Image (cartoon, rainbow, N blue to C red):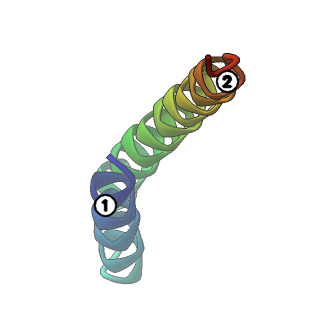
Amino acid sequence: MLYWAAIFLVIAIVAALFGFGGVAGAAIEIAQILFFVFLVLFVIALVVGLIRGRRPRI
């Protein structure tokens, strides 16, 4: 997902360089959404991993 966020960021930068403001704006919004979804999923996975890793071994 982070890969796709980076791809949309590159698309936004290229579109902005060529003067396509609407395309650049849409691409940057998609990149931001994907990045924040990635962060949320990463934090959830990190918390679950910490919780599962603290079980006592018998």
The residue at the point 41 percent across, 74 percent down is: 13
Most distant residue in the front direction: 58
Eyeballing the image, is 5 above or below 50?
Answer: below
> Label 2 sits on what residue type?
Val
Q: Which mark is residue 33?
A: none
Q: Which mark is residue 3?
A: 1
Q: Nearer the viewer, residue 24 or 10?
A: 10
Q: Position of residue 31 (x, y in %)?
A: 42, 48
Q: What is the quadrant of the C terminus in the image?
A: top right
- Rounded to the nearest whole Å, what is the CA distance between mark 1 and mark 2? 22 Å
Label whose residue precedes the other's in the sequence (1 or 2):
1
Quadrant of res 51: top right
Q: Is residue 41 left or right of residue 49?
A: left
The residue at the point 67 percent across, 24 percent down is: 47
| Secondary structure state at the residue bearing disc 1 | helix
The residue at the point 39 percent across, 83 percent down is: 17
Residue density around tag 1, few if under 14, some if 14–19, many if 20 or more, within 10 Å = few
Residue beneath label 2, please? Answer: 47
